[in-house]
Amino acid sequence: MGGMFGTDGVRGVANRDLSPEKAFKLGRAGAHLLARRDPGAGIVIGKDTRVSGDMLEAALIAGICSAGVDVLRVGVMPTPAVAYLTRDLGAAAGVVISASHNPVEDNGIKFFGASGYKLPDETEEEIEALFASECAGVPCPVGGDVGRVREVRDAEDRYVKFARGTVGASLAGLKIVVDCANGAAYRVAPRIYGEMGAEVVPIFNLPDGVNINRGCGSTHPQALMEAVVAHGADLGLAHDGDADRVLAVDARGRLVDGDQIMVVCARSLKEKGLLANDSVVVTVMSNLGLRLALRDAGIKVIETRVGDRYVLEELLRSGARFGGEQSGHVIFLDHNTTGDGILTALQLMAVIKESGLSLEELAGQMEKIPQLLVNVRVSDKNAVMKSPVLAGVIKEEESRLNGGGRILVRPSGTEPLVRIMAEGRNMGLLQEIVDRLANIIKEIS
């Protein structure tokens, strides 16, 4: 993979690292490579609620249309909805303008192919090479051959119909608090859950362009945990800025993470004979408790690198159809081509309704082994990861765990961070290990 595309598209501080000029050239290069065979099919463009989205959308549209390709504009829409709409509208590609769970100053540009899947590395590299050449060879049509912009006014209705069709159970009788992260789910998530019969209490559903992910959403669930108890709700749901993730909260205000959600859904799918290959794909970050709970249920765990793109690659390679990350990015490949927080929430609530059990009881199918997670901001994460000093300290600290836990140190795929995870049953020891590793990383950087 080249230097421009990370694990989840092109990211950066909007109007600085990710400038309108850069967005224009990305749109032009992407349109030429992805839609040259059928320019009239168009490219779907959606975005989250951050203020820079309008600026980058305008630049992307200009770049795409300058290559003679039409734009299908869907406005504020969850990332998984754009993936679905790309397929549903028969478009040549899709583009999402979002930085997901990142703060408001960041933004990103992510492409989907006509199939609704994220682009493979080779295609991203082709776009990057064309971008670097200043789009050499890309035609500049004139007159009636310039691309047009078409508003897809029923985009939300299309996605709502799709999402509702993935479950058969009514949600009547459930009272849920929904944290929309002031992001792309702010309107569509409460609508879907309400139309399915649930009593919905939406919070953080008033985006103003700058409050996306601010003290809310899946990265800041404390307010939701308190709200679930205050409202006497059955559960809470926390989305992130682009709604490709979801975390849950039980009636007692306790967080239920992506690992626990996967255990609940995987066991239900297996009981119904719907879990392909009796397998689940997870990343190295998934809790040991998940592995133990799935093993006891006769379910095979396939492990991959951190990042939803790697989960997806392994799903396609192995023939499994279900997997995800502890962060709540869960992929039901029988329904959508990428992680979909709303769809995942619907599947989870369907299990609650069908089983007659509470979320607390279902989440109790997995014992969470203590994990301590720390992010360290660095100037050069790649240099840190190559440090022999850090490697030596990790080896020393692993020996202290004596086989009763593990340490994982990795660079973030989207931010200038090195992430430290220590897992084991002795929290005091885990804290000592993480503190030492964090200090070493700060010294190196």
Image (cartoon, rainbow, N blue to C red):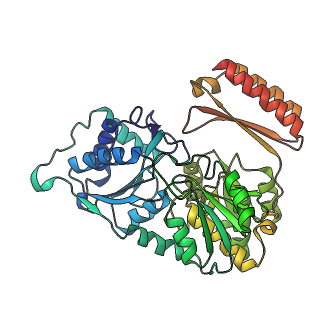
Farthest residue, direction front: 230
Q: How many marks?
A: 0
The percent position of residue 50, horizontal first and vertical second, equals 45, 47
Q: Which residue is more in the foreground, 188 or 93?
A: 188
Q: Which residue is more in the foreground, 226 or 110?
A: 226
Q: Is residue 266 in view?
A: no
Q: Quadrant of residue 425?
A: top right
Residue at 77% in and 56% down: 290
**In which quadrant is the C terminus drawn?**
top right
On the picture, is 48 further left or further right than 278? left
Q: Which residue is more in the foreground, 370 or 205?
A: 205
Question: In the picture shown, does residue 267 fall above or below 172?
Answer: above
Residue at 48% in and 45% down: 210
On the picture, is 116 further left or further right than 327? left
Q: Quadrant of residue 202?
A: bottom right
Farthest residue, direction left: 143
Q: Is residue 153 in view?
A: yes
The percent position of residue 235, horizontal first and vertical second, equals 71, 66
The percent position of residue 265, horizontal first and vertical second, equals 69, 67
On the picture, is 370 further left or further right than 259? right
Q: Quadrant of residue 134?
A: top left
The percent position of residue 241, horizontal first and vertical second, equals 53, 52
Residue at 24% in and 54% down: 69
